[in-house]
Amino acid sequence: MKKLLAVLVAAAMLTVGVMFAVGANAQMKIQEAFTTRPMLAAGLNHALALKSDGTVWAWGKNDVNQLGLGSGAHIYSWPVQVYGLSGMSAVAAGDNHSLALKSDGTVWTWGDNNYGQLGDTRLVWSYPEQVEGLIGMSAVAAGSDFSLALKSDGTVWAWGRNNVGQLGNGTTSGGACWVPEQVPGLSGVSAISASYGHVLASKSDGTVWAWGNNGWSQLGNGTSTNSSVPVQVSGLSGILDIVAGDCHSLALKSDSTVWAWGRNAWGQLGDGGATYNYPIPIQVPGLSGINAISAGNFNSLALKSDGTIWAWGYNYYGALGDGTNTNRNRPVQVSDLSGISAISAGGDHSHALKSDGTVWSWGRNDNCELGDNSNFSISRNRPVQVVGEDREGFLNLGESSQREIPTSTTTTKSTTITTTTKPTTTKPATTTTEPATTTKPAVTTTKPATTTTKPVTTTTKPATTTTKPTTSTTTTTTTTTTTTTQTQTKPPASPKTIFSTGRAATFLNWFLFIVCFGWIWMWF
């Protein structure tokens, strides 16, 4: 009887060990199967980077804690890790606030909250905090002072400032909406993008819808009248991606062509002509094989399938990256870059992610937006590499690759890159004089008069402010056949771990086997 009992106990211990080993190894394989796709998000004066391990890094201006550090310097010229974030799958940057989407579908925000753009009543969040009431989200976008989230069921949720109807709820109240509200009458949405005062949304059926400020016909419905409810952009179908610039908009079709509409004062529509603005979409000539698009302050970017970047529009600070400071009304190639997998345009600064995980920046650097640890007064008209943590080496987000443009126009997308842009107030005396705009109230539908002086854009943001904040959002997407999918994040491994979970389990299993075998041997 004692021998039989010993055998049974030994068998039970072996069974437990095997179950533990198998379960641990399975868990390890599941974790390894999910990784975050690296991405960039350029804001007004700051930039965000999402690593493949799900952590978020930031650099640039930090006067209202838009870098999410809790405290510290007002400017960082090198990347620093955002406090307390892991398992993230997307990021978005507004004028002075930031958003991150977690792999569990929750949304986290930090920075300035004057208009409720963080989804809470506190004025400033020094650290990332979860937005209550938002679950099952698949994408995020940041406007200048408002925020958006796309739910996996195809509905859109908005909160923050609403002075020109940018929340899409049928009102134009100048106050703040402090909690997320669903945009009524909108469903089947696959991607979203936000700017200073207008929003774009592409549906899974390939159509594009827009709402908010329309003073420069950036809604693309043939008028210049603001709309506080979604209206369909004229003449577009088969659209896979959309981005909203300051007062212009871009769309990427399934045939890899780019379409543009809205303001064209500095050639940001890329048509090569002198038409000041277009109320309906036109095709950008000379561009084909495009995989991604991004809209900056008054400039535009396009990523080709061969890994090169093409840019056009306003270039006083070198945001086109072609080695000059000359405005371009047709696409020109960004210098010295190849093997690019993602792009993001911000407040007169631009960023690119290489397939090897390195990050490159060019353009305005007044607040160290380029992240190259250089003097904050030095702008760059050619790409420079972003430095690493603590200014050692170079930043690497993990290897990545371009998404492929699908042939189906009903494909949904899950990951959004949001960028925010900054108004330009000067133009060099050595460049050709361009048309300029005088003051354009944020709530008016009348286009400002034009002059022959240097480009200056001003607006009333709050009632007493004359500087116009602008934002733009670029959506880089992953695709599925019918539904929006959410990428999960692999937890970063500890460098001090001797055994992985699976190896530890295997070791324990063999240990139990030897102990039990010795026990049985003694009894027999």
Image (spheres, rainbow, N blue to C red):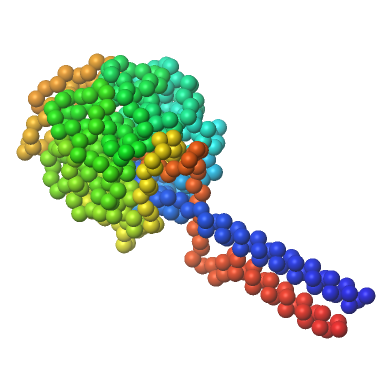
Q: Quadrant of the N terminus?
A: bottom right
Q: Quadrant of the C terminus?
A: bottom right
- Pinpoint residue 302: horizontal percent, then vertical percent: 27, 42
Point out the residue furthest to the left here: 430
Classify residue 516 as left or right of residue 172. Answer: right
Is residue 460 among the parts visible in the rendering?
no
Classify residue 103 as left or right of residue 392. Answer: right
Front residue (pair 154, 420): 154
- Pinpoint residue 197: horizontal percent, then vertical percent: 33, 26
Front residue (pair 458, 28): 28
- Pinpoint residue 220: horizontal percent, then vertical percent: 30, 23
Q: Residue at x 35, y 38 (%)?
A: 254
Front residue (pair 417, 189): 189
In the image, residue 223 above or below residue 481: above
Q: How many marks?
A: 0
Q: Residue at x 39, y 18 (%)?
A: 228
In the image, residue 195 above or below residue 78: above
Is residue 167 among the parts visible in the rendering?
yes
- Pinpoint residue 516: horizontal percent, then vertical percent: 77, 76
Point out the residue furthest to the front here: 407
Point out the residue furthest to the right here: 1
Which quadrant would residue 461 be assigned to in this image?
A: top left
Q: Residue at x 32, y 38 (%)?
A: 255
Classify residue 493 as left or right of residue 98. Answer: right
